[in-house]
Structures are given as C-alpha cells and as structure tokens.
Image (cartoon, grey):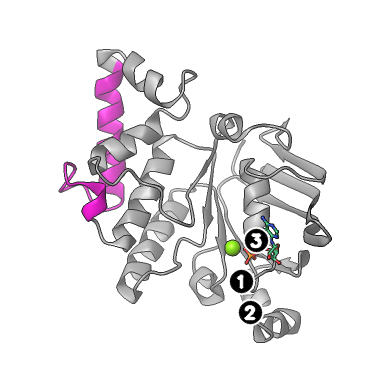
C-alpha cells in the first residue's frame, strides 16, 4: 500500500475469556507509513488485541483485514508470512546463538519451508545476501560491531533491540511491538526511542502497544486508547494527552 493508505483494518474485534470481555468490539486502522500507538492502563485489553492481530488468539467476532486480505482465521505462521512481524513481551531470542544468527532467523520467516529447513535450503547466493541483510539490520540497531557475540550476553535493552532487528529482517509490511520499553533502564529506553524515531523517519509502519503514555507521546503519529476492553478514543498525541477521559482512565490504574 502507498503511504497513507489503510494497511490494517480492525472492525468490531471481540474476544472473551469466559464471562470477561477482554476486547469489546474494537475498531481502528493503521495506515501505511505511520506509527500508531495503542495505549491504555493495565488490563485494558492491549495484549489481547495484539494477540488477535498476530494470530496467537482467535477473535470471537469481528474482522481484521491486512493488506486487503482477511486474516482473522489465519495461523500465526501465515500471518507472519503475510507481512506482520512481532516481538515478544518476554524476549524470545536464542541466547546461545550469535547476534548475526538470531537476526538471520528473521530473514527465513517468509520462506515457505519455515525456519530450519528454510535455512538449510538457502542457496549460497541467497545465504550471502541474507547475511548481508542481517548485518545491515544489526548496524541499524547500533550492534554491528559485535555480530558474533552471543545474544544471551547482551543486557536486556540490547536484547529488545535485537528482537526488533530480527523482526525487521523479515522485511515486514507492519511491525507490531508489545510493551518494548517494559523493564528497561532509562538509558536503554532512550536507545529504544531513538531506534523507533529512526524507523519513523524511514516510514516503517508500526503498531506500538504500550502502557507508558509518556514513552509513546513523542514517537507516534496517532494514538488509540483502550480502557476496560473498549476503545476510549483516538487522536493525535497532543489531543490524547489533554483528553480528560484518558487522564481519568490512567488515574484509576
Ligand atoms: P493489557 O495488555 O492492556 O494489560 P490484557 O489484554 O493482558 O490487558 O488483559 C485484558 C483483560 O483480559 C484482563 O482483565 C486480563 O486479566 C484478561 N485476560 C487476558 N488474557 C487472559 C487469558 N488468557 N485468560 C483469561 N483472562 C485473560
Ligand atoms: Mg499487556
């Protein structure tokens, strides 16, 4: 899709857990080239929404259209191949593999044969270009100087950056991040914010799910606010910051 066109459309998405409605008829869209922040207090339904988008959970009702195609019935693997890349709230790197190999795993996401067989089947030429691409991603996150360091040796902040590099290596149409700043130290948060600001300048399309309103304020083009499973409001960061309903929702948490 061209910049500004709707890339992801969520329409009336609903997800229940027993009697609890975690996501209650939520609708919003992500446009190509923007960073959309999805925020809300704890328990608002953000992670459930994230899981619906990435196929980790099924909707009870509603529609999710991505790049012109209904994805609400697709498996996680198919959604990844369709072009939605994600990171995990709890880092899921391979600690005993090098930084470079961790990023290389990301480049295989979209090969049909899947992870391991896909890796083995890469021809030499493809292997070389995949490695070059993985190096480029490492440089993008500022870790290009130590490609053969083991991922498990990195501090948490750099592991988060590495996860983003791995997701970007799949060349996704949309990157979705669930609380990437959670648990990071102040200087690590700063580095993450710089990376996201760079990606924004490059018009990488991102859905940033985040509890911390201040963290998203300067990074995103638009914000959708959830509270108690429903969409409370949406707008540009300045409007959201001054919205009494948003302040009230955050005060209660
Ligand atoms: P957020 O990410 O905004 O903090 P969640 O989507 O994790 O919110 O949770 C929304 C609500 O759904 C919460 O009340 C939570 O307890 C509930 N919930 C989330 N996942 C499950 C689950 N797997 N089983 C039962 N309840 C769940
Ligand atoms: Mg969450």
Q: Nearer the viewer, mark 2 or mark 3?
A: 3
Q: Secondary structure at mark 2?
A: helix
Which residue is the site of mark 2?
241
Majority secondary structure of magenta residues: helix
The quadrant of the rendering that contains the C terminus is bottom right
**Of label 2 and label 3, which has the lower sequence position?**
3
Q: Dot 3: few (<14), some (14–19), or many (≥20) neighbours within 10 Å? A: many
Please state the extent of the stretch shown in magenta in the rendering: 126-153
The structure residue drawn at horizontal position 43% and vertical position 42%, both measured from the top left corner, is 167
- Furthest-front residue in view? 18
Q: Nearer the viewer, mark 3 or mark 1?
A: 3
Residue neighbourhood size for the residue with mark 2, other residues' Cα within 10 Å, grouped as few (<14), some (14–19), many (≥20): some
Q: Residue at x 46, y 23 (%)?
A: 114
Split into quadrants, the picture shows ligand 1 in the one at: bottom right
Q: Tell me whether circle 2 and circle 1 mark residues in contact (CB < 8 Å).
A: yes
Residue located 60% across and 29% down the image: 78
Choose between 1 and 243: the one closer to the eye: 243
Whether residue 73 appears in magenta in the rendering, the answer is: no
| Residue 107 as seen in the image, left or right of residue 219 | left
In the image, residue 138 lies in the stretch drawn in magenta: yes
């Amino acid at each position: 899709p061209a910049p500004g066109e709707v890339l992801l459309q969520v329409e009336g998405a609903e997800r229940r857990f027993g009697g609890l409605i975690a996501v209650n008829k939520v609708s919003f869209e992500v446009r190509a080239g923007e960073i959309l922040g999805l925020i809300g207090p704890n328990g608002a339904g953000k992670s459930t929404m994230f899981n619906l988008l990435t196929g980790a959970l099924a909707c009870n009702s509603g529609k999710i259209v991505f790049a012109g195609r209904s994805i609400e019935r697709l498996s996680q693997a198919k959604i990844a191949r369709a072009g939605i890349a994600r990171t995990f709230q709890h880092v899921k790197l391979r600690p005993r593999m090098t930084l470079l190999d961790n990023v290389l795993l990301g480049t295989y996401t979209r090969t049909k044969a899947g992870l391991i067989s896909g890796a083995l089947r890469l021809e030499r030429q493809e292997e070389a270009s995949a490695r070059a691409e993985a190096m480029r991603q490492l440089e993008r996150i500022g870790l290009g100087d130590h490609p053969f360091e083991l991922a498990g040796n990195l501090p948490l902040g750099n592991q988060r950056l590495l996860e983003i590099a791995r997701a970007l290596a799949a060349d996704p149409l949309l990157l979705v991040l669930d609380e990437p700043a959670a648990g990071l130290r102040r200087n690590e948060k700063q580095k993450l914010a710089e990376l996201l600001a760079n990606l924004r300048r490059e018009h990488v399309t991102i859905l940033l799910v985040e509890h911390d309103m201040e963290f998203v304020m300067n990074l995103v083009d638009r914000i959708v606010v959830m509270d108690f499973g429903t969409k409370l409001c949406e707008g540009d960061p300045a409007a959201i910051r001054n919205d009494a309903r948003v302040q009230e929702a955050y005060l209660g948490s």
